[in-house]
Image (cartoon, grey):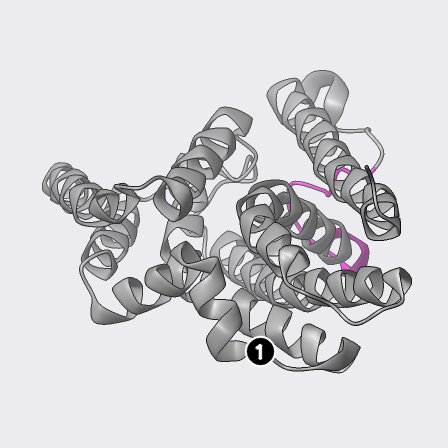
Amino acid sequence: MRTSSDIARLPVLLGLVGMIFLAWVYLLYMGWGMAHMEVGADMVLMPRMTDWGAVDLALVFLMWTVMMVAMMLPTALPMVLAFWSLPQQPPAHSSVLRVVAFVAGYMLVWTSFSLVMTLVQWALLQARLISPMMEIRSPAFGGVLLLVAGIFQFTPLKRACLSRCRSPFSFLMTEWRPGKGGAWIMGLRHGLFCTGCCWSLMTMLFLLGVMNVAWIAALTVFVLIEKTWPGGQWLSPASGALLIAWGAVLLGSAS
């Protein structure tokens, strides 16, 4: 028999799934436009290839923000569901608002990260290190990106952040705060741990193609497995070794 809390959850869960679905539709739309520039250059929401203005920066910021919704919100659902399963104070709508506040805090961190990545992309474009098609131009720069990402996979910071993301109930017990404001702070802190765990993998998009939907999907699956699969913590050193080897090959070819 369903309780009033279960009924109240349904619209929020559908809303989260709907956000993820719409984010992927947007990415597919933008990816198709990048792959068909002969017709995609005039698409709505497509930034110019060069000489960005304020509107173009805003569109790239939107692109990164939606990308983070598509990639990171699915990986946060186990934490959100764990948060929702804990005893909450009545009435049911108060529980719903706390979950909304938690998700809002989590996505605020990734939205801030999107702003940083937008500015980094603009700087790389101005320095001619990436092409107008949002692909890396310099093998040496790509090799450095890979080495940095690979080395980070072995660091204590990576292990600490990943352990907090992989243990929802442990995180909730140690970070618990009452009220909607407390839920928002918990979401912020989970977002910070998640960003600390995954930021280096997100920089790989500059190498693989910022709007390469296949690689975006592959990174999403990798992060989801790393955070939820029982043996996922072993993916970090394994992937780190592969990234370092790949980076060494790129640097060797550049020299």
Relative side of 231 to 63, left or right:
left
Check the image and report above or below for 79 versus 178: above
**Residue 99: x percent and y percent?**
74, 61
How many C-alpha atoms fall within 10 Å of the one at disc 1: few (<14), some, or many (≥20)?
some
**Residue 153: x percent and y percent?**
24, 56
Q: Which residues are magenta?
A: 45-56
Residue shown at the point (55%, 55%) measured from the top left: 79
| Residue at which label 1 appears | 176
**Residue 12: x percent and y percent?**
82, 47
**Residue 74: x percent and y percent?**
59, 42
Q: Is residue 20 magenta?
A: no
Can residue 195 be seen here?
no
Relative side of 171 to 90, left or right:
left
Residue toward you, 51 or 34? 34
Can residue 109 be seen here?
yes
Residue toward you, 149 or 48? 149
